[in-house]
Amino acid sequence: MSALEYMTPKVEQYSINEMFLDLTSIDGCEDFEHFGHRLRAHVLARTGLTIGTGIGPTKTLAKSAQWASKEWPQFKGVLALTPGNPKRTEALLMRQPVEEIWGVGRRIGKKLNLFGITNALELARTHPAFIRKNFSVVLERTVRELNGEACIPLEEMPPAKQQIVCSRSFGSRITTKVAMQQALCQYATRAAEKLRGEHQYCRHISVFVRTSPHAVGETFYGNTAGEKLTLPTQDTRDIIGVAMRALDRIWIDGHGYLYLTIRGD
């Protein structure tokens, strides 16, 4: 997240590996796609991770752009949808299956198909009142967002009762279990501090490790393990104990690990 805050101060952590950025400050100052490529290069240099970057006037359109940036190599990981180029937006939405729209999914997608709505452009052109009557106000909001009406604000502070996540990409790869245990201990401690700071408890701890998917001549490995606690806790000792047992189940010698995540919920 800090790698993105360096580029623009208003950032929402949507999930463990997805962020929303407010680009209002660069509007009119820099081409959006040029900024997207700079952002992508900056994150790669800071973390070693290759990201897909979608830019749009609403969260839903930005997610559609991100989907396209990964779907079609010609975009080179960056795609911007802007009000000044409506034909590009229409062309993308016409090619995006309705179930691939952010917040729709397969179940709602199948029901939309019954009404003859099979892609994002068809959904965008459906009257919001029809969607509200036959589906929900949430999907109506999606329709409005597909038409460029921002309905979902940026949440710079995470809402209460979200998962507690601590993650790290290492500057140099970790090759010994002792070194990984030390790193995990630090992040388990930090997770417990977050829980206490937000007056929360967790009942499940999971640990995820992986190697670099881009290392030449090395086999990629990534795995996760978790454990449910008998009672909710925010105690550092409990969280470290569960995290270490999870690491025992997924650690394999002989790899150079680049990434570690601990999550409590």
Image (tube, helix red, strand yellow):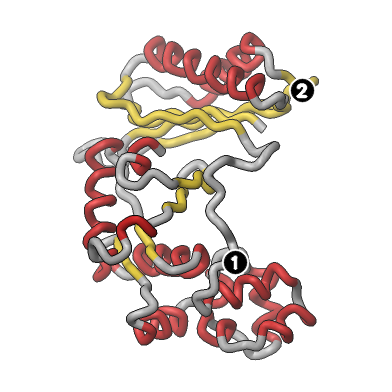
Look at label 1 and name its amino acid.
Answer: Cys
Residue bearing the label numbered 1? 151
Q: In which quadrant of the rendered view does residue 161 lie? A: top right
* Residue of label 2: 232
Secondary element type, mark 1: loop
Of residues 242 and 5, which is closer to you in this image? 5
Residue 82: image x %, image y %? 36, 74
Q: In this view, does 52 lie to the left or right of 193?
A: left
Q: Total marks drawn?
A: 2
Residue type at the position of mark 2: Pro
Nearer the observer, 13 or 24 = 24
Q: Which residue is drawn at 20% across and 40% down?
A: 216
Mark 2, secondary structure of its residue: strand
- Residue at image position (50%, 47%) is 12
Q: Disc 1 or 2, which lies upstream in sequence?
A: 1
Image quadrant occupied by the N terminus: top left
